[in-house]
Image (cartoon, rainbow, N blue to C red):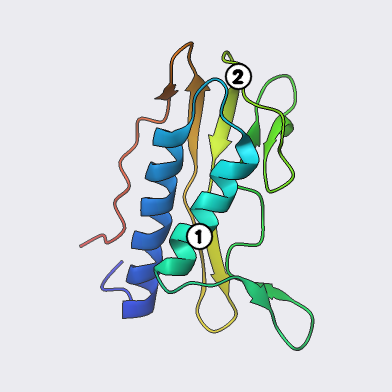
Amino acid sequence: KGRPADVVQRAFDAVCKARDAAKKALGPGVVPGAVHRAAEASMTSDGFPTGRCENGSYYGFFHGLGHGVGLDIHELPHLNPRGIKPLRGGEVITVEPGLYYPEWGGIRMEDMVYITADGAECLTQITSDFVIE
């Protein structure tokens, strides 16, 4: 509620941009690791790098972009840098980029996506409003 700090608003915008681009890139034959790396590169180019603090903790986008959803909440396919098996179609997956920094906190946006025969369909029907007046 209220007006976010500038860095938090910019991070929200960067996460939403990466999420929307990732959803557009998904479809049968797409390699999940490539989509993860593109989302990370997008957020890095928007000024939010990923790295490691002196104390050993991580900052930025240090988790996977998403995962399959089925009988278990976290299952294959994994949308992370190691995801090399192309999507086939018929999968239900999450797309959930996020940014985390010890100085101000974190933001993660998650959508559920169905991989269709020729692309992807977002199943999430809620808007991405950030500021509540």
Q: Secondary structure at mark 2?
A: loop
Give the CA distance from mark 1 to mark 2.
25 Å
Q: In the rendering, at what x and y percent does residue 2 appear? A: 27, 71
Q: Which residue is mark 1?
A: 41
Which of the image's four quarters has the N terminus? bottom left
Q: Earlier in the sequence, mark 1 or mark 2?
A: 1
Q: Is residue 30 above or below residue 56?
A: above
Query: In percent of the image, x 48 and y 30: which residue is there?
Result: 26
What amino acid type is highlighted by mark number 2?
Glu
- The image quadrant that residue 33 belongs to is top right
Q: Which residue is mark 2?
A: 91
Query: In percent of the image, x 66 and y 62: which residue is there?
Result: 62
How many marks are shown on the rendered structure?
Answer: 2
Task: Let me know if residue 51 appears in the view.
Answer: yes
Residue positioned most to the bottom = 54
Query: In percent of the image, x 59 and y 62: which residue is there?
Result: 61
Q: In the rendering, at what x and y percent does residue 28 appear? A: 54, 20
Q: Residues within 10 Å of mark 1 (few under 14, many from 20)?
A: some
